[in-house]
Amino acid sequence: MPSFPVDISRQLTPGHPTWPGDPDFRVEPQARIARGDSVNTGEIRTSTHTGTHVDAPWHYDDAGRRLHEVPLGTYIGRCRVVSVQGSGEPLTLEPGALAGLPDTLPPRVLLNTGQPAHWEEFPTRFTALSPAFVRELARRGVQLIGTDGPSVDPLTSKTLDGHHACRETGLLILEGLNLSGVPDGEYDLMCLPLPLAEMDGAPARAVLLPAGTLDGLNG
Ligand SMILES: Nc1ccccc1C(=O)C[C@H](N)C(=O)O
Ligand SMILES: [Zn+2]
Ligand SMILES: [Zn+2]
């Protein structure tokens, strides 16, 4: 029995790795009481895709919705954490990975692919989602896919087939979760992306609550 809330966000430590080519994640001290300022403050610089974050559809589709156009309820409500294993090279999930799971799934599924709790370096080896896998999740009622990997497509993909399968099926994407040590099962997800208007995505805080806690909210 985990202790709730279970924090499934990655700690944004100085030097947290970012997607290759994205700006370094930086946290810099600004005001310091120890230097005579009245308060302590800091400055952060981050890619919108660092650590635990959501992708707005506009990230991979110029006609897609931007972050402020995605209803917050997408990220709040019943979810299921599922351990899955990819196959092939690059590691990819196919529909068979869902064998043994019910034909109807909650609106949110979080995929535990075995990524560690902390990334010392950017994980170049992670599990991608095939379009067939995405379509099968959509068929089972899923509306939000979360993964502990940094992307739903392989690192070197230019075609972003997994992302586009999500676009075609209306599925939204949450990436970079920390699901290390989280038992499979049903929970309520509460994930709140930073309210960055007009953006393509945003870092988010995500926690799990006992299933049913949020009953009464939509979805
Ligand atoms: N930041 C990037 C720069 C160039 C190319 C891809 C990315 C990504 O972020 C891809 C990843 N699929 C993501 O959604 O986080
Ligand atoms: Zn992203
Ligand atoms: Zn993505």
Image (cartoon, rainbow, N blue to C red):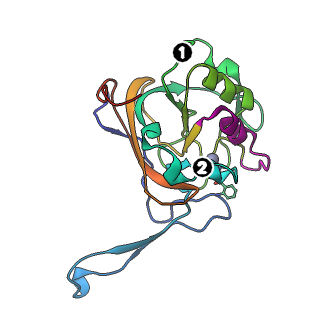
Q: Which residue lies furthest to the bottom in this view?
A: 36
Q: 198 or 97: which is nearer to us?
A: 198
Q: In this view, does 102 lie above or below 200?
A: above
Q: Please report the bounds of the magenta region as a residue range.
A: 155-171
Is 167 colored magenta in this rendering? yes
Let me know if residue 120 appears in the view.
no
Image quadrant containing the N terminus: top left
Residue 56 drawn at (x, y percent): 57, 49
Q: Mark 2 points at which residue?
A: 65
Q: Distance between the residues labelled 2 and 1?
A: 27 Å
Is 199 colored magenta in this rendering? no
Quarter of image, res 44: bottom left
Q: 78 or 125: which is nearer to us?
A: 78
User: At label 1, which amino acid type do we have?
Assistant: Thr
User: At label 2, which amino acid type do we have?
Assistant: Arg
Q: Which mark is residue 104?
A: 1
Q: Is residue 76 left or right of residue 84?
A: left
